[in-house]
Amino acid sequence: MAKHETPLLDQLESGPWPSFVSDLKAEAEARAKNEKGIDYQIPADCVEDLLGVLELSYKHGRTHWKHGGIVGVFGYGGGVIGRYCDSPDKFPGVEAFHTVRVAQPGGKYYKTEYLKQLMDIWELRGSGITNMHGSTGDIIFIGTTTKQLEEIFYEMTHNMNQDLGGSGSNLRTPADCLGESRCEYACYDTQDLCYNLTMEYQDELHRPAFPYKFKFKFDGCPNCCVASIARSDMSFIGTWKDKIQVDQAEVKLYVDGQTPPNGGAHKDGNWGPFDIEKEVVNICPSGCMGYKGGKLLIDDKECVRCMHCINVMPKALHIGKKRGLSILVGAKAPILDGAQMGSLLVPFIEANKDNDYEEIKDVIEKVWDYWMEEGNNRERLGELIKRKGFQRLLEKCEIEADPRHVQFPRENPYIFWKEDEVAGGWNRDINEYRKHHKR
Amino acid sequence: MAFISSGYNPDKPMEDRITDIGPRKYDEFFPPVIANNKGKWKYHEILRPGVLVHVAESGDKVFTVRVGGARLMSASLIREICEIADKHCDGYLRFTTRNNIEFMVDNESKLPALEKDLSSRKFAGGSYKFPIGGTGAGITNIVHTQGWIHCHTPATDASGTVKATMDVLFDDFQKMRLPAQLRVSMACCLNMCGAVHCSDIAILGYHRKPPLLDHEYLDKMCEVPLAIAACPTAAIKPTKVELPNGTKVNSVAVNNERCMYCGNCYTMCPSMPLSDTEGDGIVLMAGGKVSNRISAPKFSKVVVAFFPNEMPRWPQMTGAIQRMVEAYAKGANKYERLGDWAERIGWERFFEVCELGFSHHLIDDFRDPAYYTWRQTTQFKF
């Protein structure tokens, strides 16, 4: 018998899509039965109360969670977010119900043995409710008490070799696409770069020293499956410099209708037979393709690497061989000064495992030095770049301006020349001037 | 309940402390077929909705079955996922960026049993536990935020709006009939933990009332200068207030005309809550994308200024989403994303074919970029 009536939430149990309400109810029931005989370290009925407090929000149209409190584990400034219910008299099981962020493995691959071990800890010491995964990428544990935080951290670090993720004005847990592990489009090893930088910058991840949050995301190609270009302060997007690799025999199989276009992504649509002119050549954004005499022609120098032709004919076309990545900076959601997309800072850089990604780290550290020196409190990198101008960033990163940095050149001539750029400088003698120009 | 110690000694927190060890390394969890062929994949094909094959240079193949799931997930459900992976996939699985679960096998012959098992599992309330789909030119899972289940700033619920939306879009989760992929995202307040600002369709929780002021406690609970500095429109100033009992306290005053309801002050000061039954609700945005394919990535545009929160299934919101999806399915060219289609036909036509109203709320008036969104040409459609 449920502890709280949930008539509104009950209506979210029907319909085909997996119902979180059904799942929560099943979990509440499992905790009540406790067939495994777990000595629950937080109230056994916390999931009942979680359903109860959510039902109340559905009734009121308002949240019933208070502002976070400062809780965490010793020595870390992030990884735990305090959360308290504003109606603890009605829902004592969730009075203190903190979030724990657990750093996820790259590509979000798991062995079941690991997940079960994680759940053993979380069922004993928390609510058993998770997010798989949070928006930034972490495994999220929803709901435990203050006293359990150190215990969870101790068990994770000692028994599972597993650390917490980031929160607050830290480097947030970096996230990647699955990259080379299962994708033919990956232009660099996203998982390795993500892991390498995560380990290199553990201090920045756990101890807040930044003006605000900072996110790294790693996309293996310009398809941007982890949306790095829209939501990371520094976005690493795979690309290549040479020619798209073409297998003309396979192109022909697409043209002849033997291979379904776009990896079969359009199988349920009535799109008629594949038309390479219409579907590839004519919608290439740089117009660098042709199809003549049964051959696909690409003027690679004019290619902007949008991925369309490769996406349409993955069996016939392959990314180039001279691979690396582009670095874009400053993306963020609208708070405060409007949303920003990442802006191109480094058009091409190699992802060199052999020297421990030295060149990439050099760029990162220059960007951080600048942001920490000149960024205001709670100012994202993108906002600083906007406030100070893109030139300032280039200067601080010691990167030469390049037409690739702009969509188009400025439309006003209000150039802020630097004194050393103008012969003779600013200091002039008015008397000398007046010798030739009477008052 | 008896307290069970992990071994941690609160009197000596540094004793045996392990820190800064990061996540587990990615390659610890690779299934053998992935480990053996990393960096050597040749091509892939979607065999049917939700089922993919990736083929390696070696000739090895990995078959993936993708299933949707609520990202809010219980330990019991995770154990059930593990049981399935143990039974069919040698104990390996992965999650996608968009909260799907992927079960991988190294031989096509293992697919039918896996697919049958996944499709047969249902929750007590009747919904699928593991619906197969979310690939290609269809609608995949919705990335979303926390909402009323566990956050202090939401203007709506996340899990509920997502469940309601995915129920109406479910056919397109299991089909690939659309012109291109259509990404739906949900964020329950302007902070946008879910970064929905570049999605084909975005559901956004939004507050419409300036913060309440808890004068009696404000100066005790908050750093007043931080609350003032947090305001992007400089609408907050310090003030002294006389409480009904005659005591004078330091507090803040809000210029309501200038407030953009972003909640940034509330993030800094718990005595300035915003949530309100009538004030809060849903904004719909459309036409954004993150891919560089064909056209550049772009921001989503606000296409519905406000729908009230209609618990538990938000029918006006899901209705408008359905109309957008259907109009797009009918009107767009193959490979054309929703935003590219809207730009090609013109936004004036977009509102017409999606049967959405237009009002002054949808004209940008926020700072400089607003000017660039007004129509500065005589080219438009009647």
Image (tube, rainbow, N blue to C red):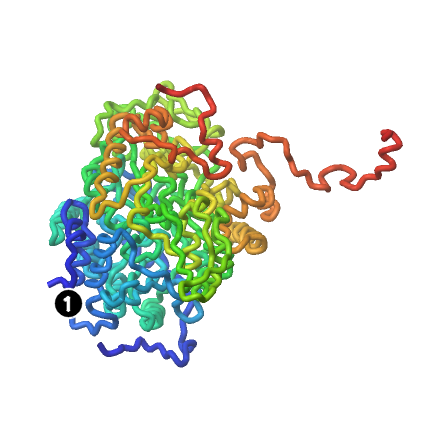
Q: Give the chain letter at badge 1.
A: A
Viewed as shown, does residue B117 lie left or right of B212?
Answer: left
Q: Which residue is at the far bottom? A: B11
Q: Specify the quadrant that holds the N terminus of chain A.
A: bottom left
Where residue A388 sits: x, y (%)? Answer: 58, 45
Residue A188 in view here? no
For the point 29% across and 33% down, the residue is B180
Q: Position of residue A370 (x, y in %)?
A: 57, 52
Q: Is residue A185 above or below residue A174?
A: above
The residue sitting at the right extreme is A435
Residue B230's spot in the image, x, y percent?
Answer: 48, 53
> From this viewpoint, is residue B184 visible?
yes
Relative to the observer, which residue lies in front, A184 or B301? B301
- Write down the residue under mark 1: A32
Amino acid type, mark 1: Ala
Tell me: residue B108, above or below residue B264. above
Does residue B133 sit above or below B266 in this rendering? above
Q: Please report the residue visible at 38 percent of the width from the left and 42 percent of the height from the top.
A: B197
Q: Residue at x 28, y 67 (%)?
A: A95
